[in-house]
Image (spheres, rainbow, N blue to C red):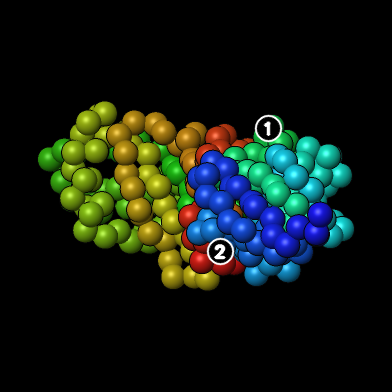
Amino acid sequence: MGEKRTCTVLFEPSNASIEVAPGTLISAAASAAGVRINLPCGGQGRCGRCLVQVRAGHVARRASAKLPQELAQQGYALACQATIYEDAIVFVPAQEEMERVLVPVGGVSQKAAKAEQFLVPPEPEVQRCYVQLDPPSLEDNTADVDRLRRHLASQCGLAGVSLGLPVVQRLGRALREQGWRVTATVEQPREGGGLWLIDVAPGDAASRLYGVAIDIGTTSNVVTLVDLHTGKMLATASAYNAQISCGE
Ligand code: FES
């Protein structure tokens, strides 16, 4: 019997198949079969993100630090670094599933726990201040804006606060809703430019000051809710970044 001249590769879950010459890269076979495999590093074996699972048949894997031994033992291969030498069945995981393989369950919380070890006190550019205003009277009929500015200066040490029209429009209702007790959120840009009142809310909410940290990565986007008083991460959500199909 002569040497086998072509190999049949069946890709799952799409069930697309293709005949290729021995020595063909899995990524090239997939491309020829119309199966999309993301190659973020351009197929140079540097990112480890083109993971597929070989479920039948033999492939030759080039050694790569991006393919841990335990994943190789489970049949995983980097599509851009593995060549086909016999009929094979290759499973192409959805990107989200691949991320789970690469970042084991608990990986995100482990990372968060690690990050907490390096907690540094935050220095936010915004601060919240609870103010109790004297209500208007015949002797003191100052306008709401001036009344608040006066009390911000005397009670919080925030003199000369500016405010824009959206805050002015909410101010009257906020001041009266809880008997002239409000929480002011004031921004003080580090590069200067003075104090800006960016929000005013009825009642005492000064203990709650939150910020959002957004990490836009090539493969995933992560949003973290942070307590700006303590720097503690309160919640994290992440989603696959679909732009990866366009490259890194
Ligand atoms: S595309 Fe980056 S390792 Fe394969």
**Residue 169 image point, x, y percent:** 18, 50
Label 1 amino acid? Answer: Val
- Comes first in the chain, label 2 or label 1: 2
- Reply above or below: 8 against 106: below
Mark 1: secondary structure: loop
Q: Which residue is mark 1?
A: 105
**Residue 204 image point, x, y percent:** 39, 31
Quarter of the image that includes the C terminus: bottom right
- Alpha carbons under labels 2 and 1: distance apart: 34 Å
Please rate how many residues cluster around mark 1, counting C-alpha atoms within 10 Å: few if below 14, some from 14 to 19, many from 20: few
The part of the image, by quadrant, that contains residue 66 is: bottom right
**Residue 57 image point, x, y percent:** 75, 45
Q: What residue is rendered at 71% in x and 44% in y?
A: 54
Contact between marks 2 and 1 (CB within 8 A): the answer is no
Q: What residue is rendered at 68% in x and 32% in y?
A: 105
Mark 2: secondary structure: helix
Q: Which residue is mark 2?
A: 32
Label 2 amino acid? Answer: Ala
Mark 1 beta carbon near ligand 1 (under 8 Å): no
Q: Is residue 165 visible?
A: yes
Q: What residue is rendered at 77% in x and 41% in y?
A: 75
Q: Residue furthest front?
A: 1
Q: Residue furthest top?
A: 178
> In the drawing, what numbered circle is on residue 169?
none
Instruction: Name the foreground residue: 103 vs 232.
Output: 103
- Reply above or below: 101 against 48: above
Is residue 199 found left or right of 228 in the rendered image?
Answer: left
Quarter of the image that includes the N terminus: bottom right
Q: Is residue 45 visible?
A: no
